[in-house]
Image (cartoon, rainbow, N blue to C red):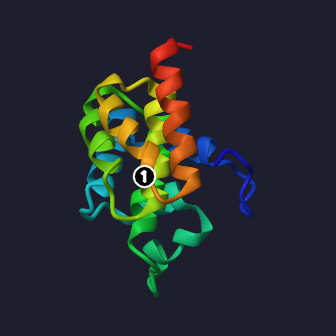
Amino acid sequence: MGSRSQWDISPRESVKRECAARGTKAVIAGCVVLLRGSEADAQLIYALGGPPARWAVTGGESGPDYWLRVWAARGLLYAYDASAGPAVVEALGDEHWRVREAAAKVCARHRIDSALPLLANLAGDSRLRVRRAAERAVTRIMDGS
C-alpha cells in the first residue's frame, strides 16, 4: 500500500495533496462516504485510486465497486480522525476481503479499540491476508505500540 504508483506519487502523497487542496476534514468525510458505499466526487476518487481511477474524471468503465471502498480505506490510513472510526469498524464486515483487509490496516494504524471484537472475529476469515491484518491490528491495539 505504500509503494510508488505508475504516476510517480505514492498513495500517501496523493492523499496529503488532496488534504492540502480541499482540507483534511473534507477528505476524511469523502472517504467515509465511499467506504459506506455511497458516491463521492470524481476528483477525490482519482486522488485515492490513482491511474486505475482515471475513469472517474474521464468517463468510461469503472471496474468492481469494491475498489472504491478499498481506496477509501487506504485514504483513511493517511487522513484520519475519530469521526471515521464507525465506518472503518463497519467495513470489517464488508463482503469483499480486500475491503476487510484494508479496514483492518486502518484499525491497526489508528488503534481503533472499538474494532477489537470484530477484529477477533476476523481470525476465522477465509482469506489469509485478512487474518494476518486483523492479527496485526489486535496486537498493535492491545500493545499500544
Q: Position of residue 108 (x, y in %)?
A: 49, 30
The residue that disc 1 covers is 100
Q: Is residue 17 visible?
A: no
Q: Quadrant of residue 136?
A: top right
In-front residue for pair 23/60: 60
The residue lying toward the viewer, choosing from 131 and 87, is 131
Q: Is residue 142 above or below residue 98?
A: above
For image coordinates 46% across by 86% down, the residue present is 61
What is the quadrant of residue 96 in the picture? Answer: bottom left
User: What residue do we see at 43% from left, 23% from top?
Assistant: 111
- Residue 60 against residue 38 in the figure, above or below: below
Taking the spot 49% from the left edge, 48% from the top edge, the residue there is 102
Of 136 and 5, nearer the camera is 136
Amino acid of disc 1: Arg
Decide which of 37, 44 is in the foreground and name it.
Answer: 37
Q: Is residue 2 visible?
A: yes
Q: Position of residue 97 (x, y in %)?
A: 45, 60
Horizontal side of 51 relative to 138 (left or right) equals right
Q: Residue furthest bottom?
A: 60
Residue 120: give x, y in percent of width and height. Answer: 39, 36
Q: Residue at x 33, y 42 (%)?
A: 88
